[in-house]
Amino acid sequence: MRVVISGVAGVGKSTVLELVRKKTNYDIINFGTLMFEMARNIDLVKDRDELRKLPVDTQINLQKKASAAIGKMNNVIIDTHMTIKTPDGYLPGLPEWVIRELKVSAYYLIEADPEQILKRRNLDSSRRRDSDTAEDIKEHQEVNRYYASSYSVYTGATIRFILNVDGKPDIAAENIVRRLMPHD
Ligand code: AMP
Ligand code: MG
């Protein structure tokens, strides 16, 4: 089975995923890392935050290559994005050609209060974040729900929204783990 876990930058996705990884037998595959390694190998980018600034057709090419690789893996949690905020607008993270490769059974959207996300972004010096306002982050989270709904309709996969409350990533993780384990 393959599931997707997504959430805007700074939502606390890495922290939640690390807790999920410890409690399940799923591997975690970071879609952006695959794209980044492919792009770096041909000298297109030096860091992962440059990916979303590449020409859209280049991003789509990398996206296709990454999804072809991930589509061959089983029992994976795919760490990716419902939409990517590019200079041209929102780019779908799971357009038809990606969905067809991935055959995802469930989508999990990790969400948090936009003000808390903004604070976390400002504390993280390892990434080159855009200068979004809390209002921009709110919009991005809303847009991600719309896109997730259409991916879900297209494939029949379920969607769950997971609130990552500040200081309580273990609760968000538990919400996901519970659903990854076999149940009646
Ligand atoms: P992350 O570290 O998860 O924020 O991912 C780094 C970058 O990888 C993102 O900012 C995007 O540029 C790219 N990326 C990740 N997933 C996708 C996807 N499904 N489609 C297109 N680009 C993606
Ligand atoms: Mg992360």
Image (tube, grey):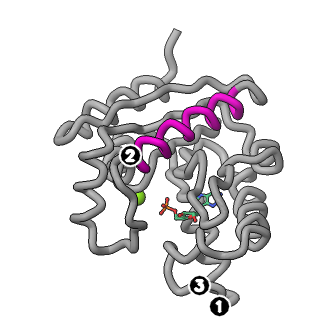
Residue type, label 2: Glu
Q: In terms of secondary structure, what is the magenta stretch mainly?
A: helix
Q: Which residue is mark 3?
A: 45
Q: Quadrant of residue 77?
A: top right
In the image, residue 51 lies in the stretch drawn in magenta: no
Q: Is residue 112 left or right of residue 140?
A: left
Within 10 angstroms of label 2, few (less than 14), some, or many (20 or more) residues?
A: few
Within 10 angstroms of label 1, few (less than 14), some, or many (20 or more) residues?
A: few
Residue found at the far top of this picture: 184
The quadrant of the rendering that contains the N terminus is top right
The local secondary structure at tag 3 comes to loop
The local secondary structure at tag 2 comes to helix
- 131 over 12 or under it: above or below: below
Residue type, label 3: Val
Residue at (75, 73) in percent of width and height: 58
Q: Which residue is mark 2?
A: 135
Residue found at the far bottom of this picture: 43
Q: Which of the two marks, 1 or 2, is nearer to us in this view? A: 2
State which region is magenta: 136-152
- Residue 6 pos. (x, y %): 50, 45
* Contact flag, marks 3 and 1 (Cβ < 8 Å): no
Query: CA gap, disc 1 to disc 2?
Result: 35 Å
Query: CA gap, disc 2 to disc 3?
Result: 29 Å
Residue type, label 1: Asp
Residue at (34, 36) in percent of width and height: 173
Q: Which of the two marks, 2 or 3, is nearer to us in this view? A: 2
Q: Is residue 60 left or right of residue 10?
A: right
- Residue 111 pos. (x, y %): 39, 37
